[in-house]
Amino acid sequence: MKFIIDDANLEKIKAIYSTFAVDGVTTNPSILAKNGKQPFETLREIRAFIGPEAELHVQVIASDAEGMLEDAHRIQKELGMNTYVKVPTTKEGLKAMKALKAEGANVTATAIYTQMQAFLAAKAGADYAAPYVNRIDNLGANGVKTAKDIHDIFKKNGLKTEVLAASFKNSQQVLELCEHGVGAATISPDVIEGLIVNDSVAMAVEAFVKDFEGLCGKGKTMKDCL
Ligand code: G3P
């Protein structure tokens, strides 16, 4: 499962990159708005930091297929042809996905709430389909199950599209999809940080240090001992 950061704040992206093995960055219009700067200013900084090969996913804004293509071309011009163009999975979006794939673009079908949307996006040739796990949960449905179902539909139908699960609120949602082997998960920095927080681990490590200091002295580590 690829491990992607769902944020546009460069300091937060740098902090996550410094610790975790990360495959790239996803953004959406709301995430860009939260960052405050003009969109391409933010996105160019992110591209420069993550490098030309890392995955960067950027969403179109226009609601008609023609406008989506124009947005896509600007995104590719500014950020590289390998940038994943995120297209909402509406009727116009499906039309745009088909046209973009005919041009050889990388396409991420987004705003996916149902298995059928994901199937149609895959038929249109999308590289990734992004179900919104937590937002689906908030509708009283099961976001993790929806993402797993989509993964299974792709595999059973021989479709090359991979799940790029998005909208996580907790570690359990991430773990369940990791166990199921979905293609990728994009996760906010806060939730990523939470994946490694565990009081039992911290206590175990603390006890090891205390025992060792009993042997060699306070503040001593392996490099200081006989
Ligand atoms: O791009 C979709 C995803 O980032 C949505 O996440 O946390 O706003 O539901 P969230």
Image (spheres, rainbow, N blue to C red):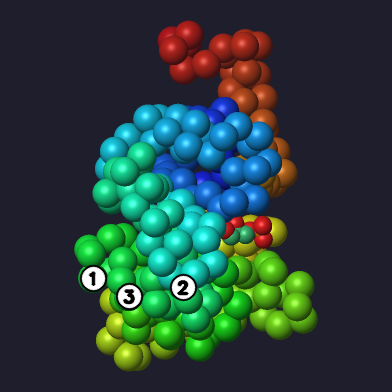
The yes-or-no answer for disc 3 within 8 Å of ligand 1 is no
Question: In what quadrant does ligand 1 lie?
Answer: bottom right
Q: Is residue 184 left or right of residue 77?
A: right
**In the rendered view of the protein, which quadrant contains the C terminus?**
top left
- Disc marking residue 98: 3
Residue annotated with mark 2: 93
Residue at image location 48% in from the left, 57% down from the top: 60
The spot of residue 225 in percent (x, y) is 47, 11
Kind of residue sitting beneath label 1: Ala
Q: Residues within 10 Å of mark 3 (few under 14, many from 20)?
A: many
Nearer-the-camera pick, 190 or 73? 73
Quote the CA–CA distance across marks 2 and 1.
14 Å
- Disc marking residue 102: 1
Q: Residues within 10 Å of mark 1 (few under 14, many from 20)?
A: few
Q: Are marks 1 and 3 in contact (CB under 8 Å)?
A: yes
Does the rendering let one see residue 1?
Answer: no
Residue at image location 31% in from the left, 60% down from the top: 106
Residue at image location 62% in from the left, 18% down from the top: 213
Does the rendering let one see residue 27?
Answer: yes
Query: Measured along the vertical axis of the image, is residue 169 above or below residue 203?
Result: below
Whichever of callouts 2 and 1 sits on the residue coming sooner in the sequence is 2
Q: Secondary structure at mark 1?
A: helix
Query: Measured along the vertical axis of the image, is residue 61 above or below residue 42?
Result: below
